[in-house]
Amino acid sequence: MKDTATPVILPVDAEQIAAILPHRYPFLLVDRVIELDPGKSIAALKNVSFNEPFFQGHFPGHPVMPGVLIVEALAQASGLLIGLSGTNMAKDDRIFYLAKVDNARFLRPVVPGDQLRLEVQLKRMIRSMGIFTARALVDGKEAATCELMCAESTR
């Protein structure tokens, strides 16, 4: 069967991202998609602003982006990879949930003013689950790495 999906024009902006992901402010953690190899890999950006609500309590006087939110941003990039790939992996009535995180490592703090580059590669699809390798970089240096499993479900 021939794939007749509309090609993705990069960059993919916040409005287009919101059409794919169910997340909304303050939990939409991907601002732009800058690279896409459909069904294989994606690179996206998250601009870390001092106005992020989590900085009020993590940590006052020394703001650091929580590692769990970096992992969530990587999971959202994984969902965008599937959603933008234009194959039968992406269906309008389906949603991917983060099901498992393995080998998470946090290598440097992410602070206001940083721009996270989110890089995700699809390792394989097993039935309705995607397995991904992911890393977040700031200024070309790894801030976090992990392996993710996302499970597909109906909305």
Image (spheres, rainbow, N blue to C red):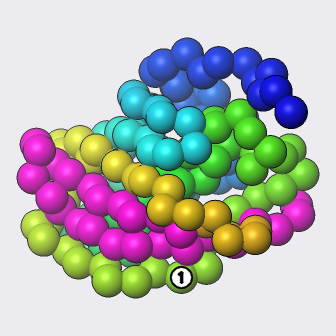
Q: Nearer the viewer, residue 128 or 106?
A: 128
Res 15 → quadrant: top right
Residue located farthest toward the front when viewing the structure as drawn: 1
Residue at image position (47%, 33%) is 36
Question: Does 66 appear above or below 77?
Answer: below
Res 109 → quadrant: bottom left
| Residue 107 lies in the magenta-colored region | no
Q: Look at the image and give the residue range highlighted in magenta.
A: 131-155
Q: Which residue is mark 1?
A: 100
Residue at image position (64%, 64%) is 125
Q: State the quadrant of the C terminus.
A: bottom right
Q: State the quadrant of the N terminus.
A: top right
Q: Is residue 113 visible?
A: yes
Q: Residue 50, percent across and down?
A: 26, 48
| Residue 147 lies in the magenta-colored region | yes
Residue at image position (31%, 79%) is 104
Q: Residue 51, percent across and down?
A: 33, 48
Most frequent secondary structure within the magenta stretch: strand
Q: Residue 97, percent across and down?
A: 67, 69
Question: Does 125 appear above or below 78?
Answer: below
Q: Is residue 61 visible?
A: no
Give the amino acid type for the residue marked by disc 1 in the picture.
Lys
